[in-house]
Amino acid sequence: MTKPSAWRRVLVADALVGYLFVLPLIVLVLGLVAYPLGNAVWISLTDKYVGYAARFVGLGNYVTLTRDPIFHKVIRNSAVFTLASVAVKVVLGMLMALALQRALVARSFLRAALLVPWVIPTVITALTWHWMFNALWGFINVTLQGVGLVREPIAWLGQPATAMAAVITANIWRGFPFFGVCLLAGMQAIPRDLYEAAAVDGASPAQRFWHITLPGLRLVLLVTTLISLIFTLNDFNIVYVLTRGGPGTATHVLATYTYEVGFQALRWGKAVAVSMYPLPVIAVMIVIVTRYLTRED
Amino acid sequence: MTLLARGLSIVLAALLLLAGAGSPALAQPAQKPKIRVWLLRTYVPDANHALEDSIKRWATSKNLDPVIEYFTFDDIETKYVAAIETNALPDVGQLQTIGPARYRGMGRLLDLTDLANELVRVNGPMLESALPVVRAPDGRFHAVPFNYITDVQFIRTDLFRKAGAKVPTTWEEVREAARLIKAKGVMEYPLGQSWNRSADGYGVFQALLYSHGGGWADEQGNYTSIMNDTWRAVVRWASEIYLKDKTVPPDAMSWTGFGNNEAFLTGKIAFTFNGPSIYYVLEKERRPILKDTLMAIKPAGPAGRNHDVLLLSWTVFSSSKQVDAAKDLIRFVMSTDEAKKYMQQSWGQMVPAFERLRQDPYWQKNESYRAVLEAPKYARTPGWPGPLTAAAAEVVATHVLTDLCARVIVDGWDIEKALEEADKRIKDIYANVPSR
Amino acid sequence: MAGRGVLAYGFIGLLLLVVGVPFYWMVNTSLKTSAQLQSLTPYYYPSPATLRNYAALLGTTNFLTWIKNSALVAVGATLVTVVVSSLAGYSLTRIRYPGRRVLATTVLVVYLVPPTLLFIPLYTVLKSFDLVNSLWALLVAYPTFTVPFCTWLLMGFFRSIPRDLEEAAMVDGATRLGAFTRVILPLTTPGILAAALFAFTLAWNEFLYALVFVHNTELKTIPVGLNDLMFGDIFLWGELMAASVLTTLPVIALYTYLQRYMVEGLTAGAVTG
């Protein structure tokens, strides 16, 4: 047993080690990004036009956006795109992880093979899906018409609903391996004897999943989902290459709208305001998950 | 611990490699002064090499080191915006059509009036249609023309013959030809015209609009309302080919730049509007349908032939420390001999703006080449009949025109409502363009 | 037991099909000339297959240079990321000190502004350190978006390990660092490998920073190089897809090897309580 003052010294030493471990992160990330972030926030409060000096306008950009019907559409599209994609990716990734855990033959190869969508350069993925969805000579229609399931070519990318489904499909295809790999890694950290004990008790696979796997994966699942939500919300290439936000504004999302306003209209202040718009929602999500993650045991 | 040691040695090795590989500039001491040039990487490698060659020969004779960096059609905006905001502009750069109008207002471009006059003395007058692009309303030149990439009609003459259709000379004839080819069963979706977020969309729409005498600015360049019958007729034309005639492929509205190229090359459409790039592929790869492909000047409307423009130009940035050398580079590359060398390697894709170059027999090769040569005469800049201003450039760059068509075709709005939205957007742009 | 095994393999087969069809399409395209592609017959296979696109890619472009640059940057960024984020992730979840919750939250704050808007001020910062126009710019810039994400990922993994394991080690006289490397790391190897994989692929596929921070043609990375195969309305489809195949397969092969070596090899000996 140690005396109280010695215990305090150990705690302080321990805390110092804690700060030391986290120092590289602070220096590298926060140090480097603090200025750009602050700059971005400032710019969103100005009428900055590329090539001209910025003038302060307060919340003017945000107010204009709130009244802009195209921006409303962009927000709606982004919400649909992000939520639908992430939801399916979670499910697909979970199933992939469960299946891979059970697979013993060629396990390493299978795990790597299913990673292919994640590794291929995104622009190529998007171009490939653009071809697959083409109404007149795309793989999907040619095959469907070839086997006689469909008579008239389906204009996948020509109608708002199917175009949205198409970009979501491409995003899911590219993104599900991320969940698969993370969840599989999470599953491998769950102690084997929990499963053995449950099997002895006669629990069904579904019960084992619900009572052992899922709780054990809770944190990894939470973190992975949050990260995916953020990345999907900011996804540019897939939408831009597949539809450019079209037809019309049917698949215009935050990332493509930001690009248009910033690089094509040259209205930088407004562009930053666009991308800052979801900040409150994301910030809340981050705070909630952090609380969970840094909770005392 | 072996794993840790192994890991650390990998880190060290990687970093050493990077250090060695990442700093080639440190290896050689700086010798000749550098001159930075930004060029468009066109799809004609022969032409790109010819231009590079020209520049390098000039640089050697001046004892300068040319640093050539390329941008593409897709990242030109990104690169220029980044360069402007970080003060990293090159000495000499090529600009797209709206470049001079946008950047001169920012004070980034040098006054090149002398150089322009010199080039006219050497190469003959430049086409009228080039003037609004490179010359400001006050008469000063901030850029000099390089080449047009002309938008024309691509016609499959064999399919037209089969259906008994004639090459359209008016916009109404375009619709008739498409309807006829479809009715005769020769092709299900004959016309490949998309109102999308690319030059195929907003370029052709402007050609349609201006040929009908329509516009969103007056001759002084101020905004005028678009709620009039001309615009209604134009939007009706644009939407009815989809909704009524159904002569356009059903997913054409989300084609990106290469959509109509591929559709034409795969024989899925009978005609389209595009730059000469389709012809380049046909000639370069000696495709069978080359003999049945004709390039023709775009059609006329009630107000005559008033089409869109894609003109590449040269400029010198005011931040350059070598203004005289920069101007000399342009002078050299655009001298008659050098420009003709370039032309010979261009596969007919880049059309000169200067008379002496245009008169070269290179362009009399066949009817298609002649059409490409002739077409820029009818080019009008965005904001016609007014001058090309930053506001007009923004109207085009933010896809107001094609969104207008999309509202009717895709979202099912009626024309009046769509016009009102577009009208408001244009009005807002003109009210908020920087003039400081 | 066997029934569920069949289900698992059946589902994997389905996933392989889903993954395989578009990938097959890429390979198919890479083995066709553009004339074959645009003749549309035959459709599903190249006839004859040709390696011309691969030859053109390797011969006329700087493809190998792009790969070298991408590999250097990706490996470097991954190593930095793994070290920084595992230390930070461990500290934020398992050591107690004031302000850790705030730190954990701000780490992800970086993602609130996308790179498209961050890159201009970031360029200015890098320029002030004279890093611009060298691969160092990317090596420094890439961790700004890989580290937060990997830190959070590893926080999730670290959090799942019971506290008593390292407390046992520390009572036995180990330091924090010792407990970290000898007790925690081996248990979270799958997680670390996952984080490394994601850091690597994010760096491997990053486009905007590589386009803007590096002008030198000798220093192009793969995504920027791919740009050279696309010209507005003319795309060199065969070469693009050949590039896609050649950049994907090595990464997959590497990951297979690492999987077998790191995960299977190390966790086999780990203590699981």
Image (spheres, rainbow, N blue to C red):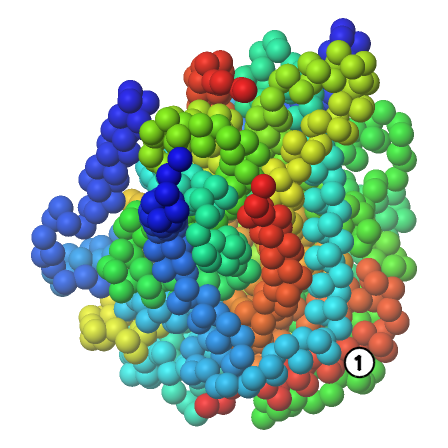
Q: Quadrant of residue A175?
A: top right
Number of numbered callouts drawn: 1
Establish if C272 lies above or below A143: above
Q: Nearer the viewer, residue B289 or B189?
A: B189
Please rate how many residues cluster around mark 1, counting C-alpha atoms within 10 Å: few if below 14, some from 14 to 19, many from 20: some
Task: Give me the residue at 39% from left, 71% from top.
Answer: B85
Q: Nearer the viewer, residue B395 or A296?
A: A296
Res B341 seen here: no
Q: Which residue is mark 1?
A: B420
Image side of residue B285 versus residue C38, left or right:
left
> Residue most toward the top?
C2
Could you say where residue B204 lies in the image, as x and y percent from the top left? 67, 65
Identify the amino acid type marked 1: Glu
Mark 1, chain letter?
B
Res B36 seen here: yes
Q: Quadrant of residue B124?
A: bottom left
